[in-house]
């Protein structure tokens, strides 16, 4: 039974019918209390009742006669006197509407007025005749202007419709909050996880329905994701460390061989490959350390890249090239400082390596994103290679061939770092000359 009640479909189905039934019951109750044609008698009608009752009490024989008929122009109308058993003692013929009015209204503390398109009924009013207690009711045909004025004392059907609408709206809001509120909390936590905040605690939703199950599944997913990434980083770090030992021994053996024998082209090739292998291992170790130790924090963008720009300007000067940067000075963002700095630095170094004479860095804010564009005036790339340069160990042919150096990890590291920030990186050939790399990072 509990399992059935914890089903979201059952909750919505039951809530729908509960809202429908409660709204209908309240509407029916209100319609009985505040009908437009049935309401509490106003003060001037009570005065008429009292005056007429006093007249009857002064001359009861005249009014109690079954043959009594008031004058057509009487402002009081037709009188009905009812005994304690509910019988009309002064009228032989009783209309259905009058009979219903008498049956529904017998509380002397709450005299009522009821109207239709033709008649008006008022009552009851206590009256004492021949030492007996009776109830007095009046029926008359009011003029149209009086009927219109009396109906204004009642409540419009719009009032009843408005009450029903507001009641159902309130209950629907409560149902929606019960369903949507935890989903909003889960969405907020999931968005943070998607931006790289893998340590974000998911809200604890102690419910047995599908929303509670979704919360448990997301928590298990985040835990598994954390564990997988941690294991992957640990494996990468362990492999890199293990590779350094045989590589060190290989370099020592090469050095000893060069001392004892003449250097040959084969030995020089082995030495170059050994150096590239060392560069790859160092790059992997550096990336692994940055990912393991990465922590997000509020950072000013100009402070983040100040040293990077100084280093790039110095390297450009050594290469007889120019490096210029244009970026917002008062921009603050939440990021992994080391990872983001490393990503920008790798792209800048790659641009300096292949530029003919100059490299430019421009940063701006567009649509709540930080956009960093790095351009060089080098030979550019073939269109087929633009999407491949961010793959690990990918080496470009033709203009940017293996002789230019590098191990093919710089742009891959940059792509990984940008993706960890929830952003994107793309490359295209500049309209004039060279390669243009764009980094887009969401600003929180």
Image (spheres, grey):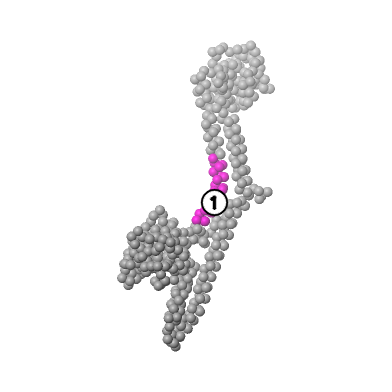
The residue located at (35%, 58%) in the rendering is 431
Q: Nearer the viewer, residue 248 or 311?
A: 248
Q: Position of residue 267 (x, y in %)?
A: 44, 81
Q: Quadrant of the C terminus?
A: bottom left
Seen in the picture, residue 70 relative to 272 is either above or below; the reply is above
Q: Quadrant of residue 113?
A: top right
The residue located at (59%, 56%) in the rendering is 216
Q: Quadrant of residue 363?
A: bottom left
The secondary structure that most of the magenta stretch takes on is helix
Q: Nearer the viewer, residue 297 or 160?
A: 297
Residue 114 visible (yes or no): yes
The outermost residue toward the bottom is 260
Q: Is residue 188 magenta?
A: yes
Residue 49 visible (yes or no): no
The residue located at (45%, 76%) in the rendering is 273
Please indicate whether residue 202 sits to the left or right of residue 271 in the image.
Answer: right
Label total for image: 1
Seen in the picture, residue 442 relative to 28 is either above or below; the reply is below
Q: Quadrant of residue 346?
A: bottom left
Q: Which residues are magenta?
A: 169-191
Q: Position of residue 357 (x, y in %)?
A: 31, 67
Q: Is residue 205 magenta?
A: no
Seen in the picture, residue 99 relative to 31 is either above or below; the reply is above
Q: Position of residue 181 (x, y in %)?
A: 54, 49
Please indicate whether residue 158 sits to the left or right of residue 316 in the image.
Answer: right
Which residue carries the number 1 mark?
183
Q: Nearer the viewer, residue 153 or 58?
A: 153
Q: Secondary structure at mark 1?
A: helix
Give the crowd class for mark 1: few <14, some 14-19, many >=20 residues within 10 Å: some
Seen in the picture, residue 328 relative to 263 is either above or below; the reply is above
Q: Position of residue 117 (x, y in %)?
A: 55, 21
């Amino acid at each position: 039974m509990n399992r059935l009640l914890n089903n979201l479909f059952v909750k919505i189905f039951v809530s729908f019918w509960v809202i429908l039934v409660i709204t209908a019951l309240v509407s029916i109750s209100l319609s009985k209390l505040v009908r437009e044609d049935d309401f509490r008698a106003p003060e001037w009608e009570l005065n008429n009742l009292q005056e007429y009752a006093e007249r009857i009490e002064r001359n009861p024989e005249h009014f109690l006669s079954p043959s009594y008929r008031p004058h057509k122009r009487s402002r009081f109308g037709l009188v009905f006197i009812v005994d304690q058993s509910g019988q009309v003692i002064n009228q032989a013929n009783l209309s259905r509407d009058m009979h219903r009015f008498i049956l529904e209204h017998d509380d002397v503390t709450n005299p009522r007025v009821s109207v239709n398109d033709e008649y008006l009924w008022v009552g009851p009013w206590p009256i004492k005749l021949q030492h007996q207690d009776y109830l007095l009711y009046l029926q008359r045909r009011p003029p149209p202007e009086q009927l219109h004025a009396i109906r204004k004392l009642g409540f419009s059907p719009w009032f009843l419709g408005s009450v029903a609408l507001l009641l159902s709206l309130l209950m629907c809001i409560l149902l929606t909050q019960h369903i949507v509120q935890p989903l909003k909390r889960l969405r907020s936590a999931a968005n943070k996880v998607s931006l790289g905040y893998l340590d974000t605690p998911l809200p604890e939703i102690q419910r047995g329905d599908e929303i509670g199950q979704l919360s448990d599944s997301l928590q298990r997913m985040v835990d598994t994701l954390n564990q997988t990434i941690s294991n992957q980083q640990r494996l990468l770090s362990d492999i890199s460390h293990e590779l350094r030992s045989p590589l060190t021994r290989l370099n020592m053996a090469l050095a000893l061989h060069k001392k004892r024998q003449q250097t040959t082209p084969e030995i020089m090739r082995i030495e170059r490959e050994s150096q590239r292998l060392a560069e790859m291992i160092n790059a992997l170790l550096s990336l692994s350390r940055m990912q393991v130790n990465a922590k997000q924090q509020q950072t000013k963008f100009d402070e983040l890249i100040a040293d990077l720009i100084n280093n790039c300007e110095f390297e450009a000067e050594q290469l007889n090239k120019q490096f210029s940067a244009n970026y917002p000075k008062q921009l603050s963002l939440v990021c992994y400082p080391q990872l983001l700095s490393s990503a920008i630095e790798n792209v800048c170094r790659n641009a300096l390596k292949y530029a003919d004479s100059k490299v430019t860095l421009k940063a701006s804010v567009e649509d709540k994103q930080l956009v960093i564009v790095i351009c060089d005036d080098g030979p550019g790339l073939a269109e087929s290679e633009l999407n491949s340069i961010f793959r690990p160990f990918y080496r470009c042919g033709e203009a940017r061939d293996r002789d230019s150096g590098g191990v093919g990890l710089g742009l891959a590291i940059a792509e990984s770092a940008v993706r960890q920030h929830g952003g994107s990186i793309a490359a295209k050939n500049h309209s004039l000359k060279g390669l243009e790399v764009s980094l887009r990072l969401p600003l929180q």
